[in-house]
Image (spheres, rainbow, N blue to C red):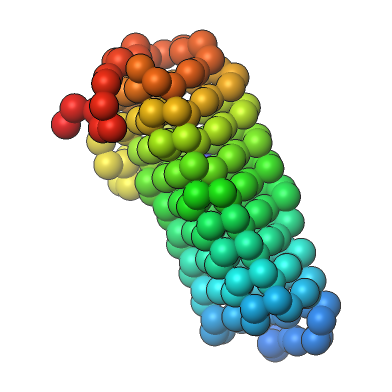
Amino acid sequence: MSLRWRACPAAAMAILGVSTACDQHVPGTETSKVMGNIEVAAGEHTGDVSTVNGSIHIRENAVVRGAQTVNGSISLEPHASATELTTVNGPIRLGQGARVSGAAHSVNGGLSLADGAEVNGRLTNVNGPIRVAAAHVGGGIETVSGGIELGPDAHVDGGIHVRKETGISFHLFSEGTPRIVVGPGSHVGGTLNFERKVSLYVSDKATIGPVQGATAVKYSGERPPG
């Protein structure tokens, strides 16, 4: 998903492949809705799940192929797994040990990974805080206006990319200077590339790759100043 794509429900419905004519449900393979939440039961294995106006809740140890919504959150309980997660307006949350083999995208919504969670692909949003605890991101992190907090003991491969703001919509949603924190025991492999002004704090017990577009402020202890 391009971060330059604007949140348009009609376009989003087409991208997600959701029919507006009627709700569909094929047990064990695919669930598609226009209105309403979707819940995948604990331990259940199913195909793609998608809705336009509603949240998606994937219970503990459940497995889905993909989860997509336009207006709503997506949450994976501990040890649930999916191939890819996509939402336009809403947060994405991964519980302990939850796993996404591909990417996790939100346009307007926060992203959070609990201890032991993993996103093998890219973790991206435009607006909203990004929180990665003692978890792993394999394809890097990308945002425009979201602050990022890593760790303690986070592991991010593929670097961090904070894009510059473009267009009126980004200026409307911008929350000022993003704050980027790389906590104790955390590792960021790859380049930390900042196309806009950020406040970057790096623990003296963390390791990072090269930094472009910002100056890292080293700190000691559990939390940076401020």
Q: 174 or 192, which lies in front?
A: 192
Q: Can the viewer see residue 4 in this picture? A: no
Q: 100 or 50, which lies in front?
A: 100
- Looking at the image, is 152 positioned above or below residue 38? above
Q: Can the viewer see residue 215 in this picture? A: yes
Picture quarter containing residue 223? top left
What is the quadrant of the C terminus in the image? top left
Q: Is residue 208 left or right of residue 80?
A: left
- Looking at the image, is 195 positioned above or below residue 114? above
Q: Residue at x 74, y 86 (%)?
A: 24
Where's residue 52, x and y in %?
Answer: 58, 74
Q: Residue at x 47, y 35 (%)?
A: 153
Q: Residue at x 78, y 75 (%)?
A: 46
Q: How many marks?
A: 0
Where's residue 53, x and y in %?
Answer: 52, 76
Where's residue 29, x and y in %?
Answer: 83, 77
Q: Residue at x 69, y 71 (%)?
A: 62
Q: Is residue 30 left or right of residue 88?
A: right
